[in-house]
């Protein structure tokens, strides 16, 4: 029961934050009750009625900005690998792009790149540094 209430509260907070952000910045099409049209929101929000606005153009611009930042981090971590041929992996953190999360970008030579999103309140840079310097666990 507690978990179900937490899910309802979390869904309501996310929807309210989205609605407030959209309403404050850009005129958009209003949907009176998106919960009625989305089974996932019905499951998470229960019977709460919310108002959500959505601007597709604003969403597209936000996605483009996020993808550009991700590609910049990817290129930066690959440049670290290219500049130091004797290392097998490189990483960097981005703690300025998001108020709630720190993004860790990792590149492994001849394997690929990845990003991890770490909640800011759980992030400890010194622990991360020790962990990454230990190398792979066998």
Image (cartoon, rainbow, N blue to C red):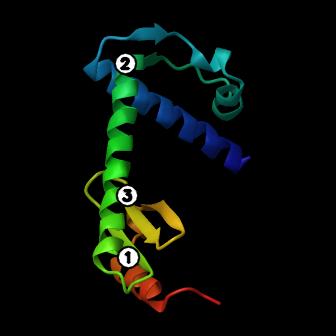
Choose between 108 and 100: the one closer to the eye: 108
- The residue lying at 32 percent from left, 48 percent from top is 69
Judged left or right of residue 4, residue 101 is left
Q: CA distance from mark 2 to mark 3?
A: 26 Å
Label count reads 3
Residue 70: x and y in percent read 37, 50
Q: For the point 66% across and 21% down, which residue is it? A: 38
Q: Nearer the viewer, residue 59 or 19?
A: 59
Q: Measuring from the top left, give residue 92's x and y in whole percent.
A: 33, 69
Q: Nearer the viewer, residue 67 or 12?
A: 67
Please indicate, yes or no, whether residue 65 appears anywhere in the rendered image.
Answer: yes
**43 left or right, relative to 93:** right
Question: In 3D space, how far apart are the residues under numbered discs 3 and 1 (Cα atoms)?
Answer: 22 Å
Percent across and percent down for residue 111 are 54, 69
Q: Counting other residues with Cα less than 10 Å from the Cα at mark 3, is it few (<14), some (14-19), or many (20 or more)?
A: many
- For marks 3 and 1, the one nearer the N-term is 3
Residue 89 on image: x %, y %: 43, 77
Q: Which mark, residue 74?
A: 3
Q: Which structural element holds mark 1?
A: loop
Look at mark 2 in the image and give the residue it sits on: 57
Look at the numbered discs 2 and 1 and tell me whether their residues touch, using CB distance below 8 Å. no
- The answer to whether one can see residue 94 in this image is no
Kindly indicate the quadrant of the structure image that contains residue 80: bottom left
Task: Look at discs 3 and 1 and give the one toward the viewer.
Answer: 3
Query: Which residue is denoted by mark 1 in the rendering?
Result: 124
Q: Is residue 31 above or below residue 66?
A: above
Identify the mark at residue 101; answer none if there is no mark: none
Q: Which residue is rendered at x = 52% and y = 10% of the image?
A: 32
Q: Secondary structure at mark 2?
A: helix
């Amino acid at each position: 029961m507690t978990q179900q209430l937490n899910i309802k509260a979390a869904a309501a907070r996310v929807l309210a934050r989205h609605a407030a952000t959209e309403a404050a910045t850009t005129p958009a099409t209003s949907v009176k009750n998106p919960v009625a049209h989305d089974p996932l929101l019905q499951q998470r929000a229960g019977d709460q009625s919310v108002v959500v606005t959505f601007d597709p153009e604003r969403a597209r611009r936000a996605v483009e900005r996020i993808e550009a930042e991700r590609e910049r981090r990817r290129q930066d971590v690959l440049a670290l690998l290219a500049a130091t041929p004797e290392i097998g992996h490189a990483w960097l953190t981005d703690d300025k792009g998001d108020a709630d999360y720190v993004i860790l970008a990792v590149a492994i030579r001849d394997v690929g790149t990845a990003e991890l999103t770490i909640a800011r309140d759980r992030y400890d840079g010194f622990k991360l540094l020790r962990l990454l310097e230990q190398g792979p666990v066998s």
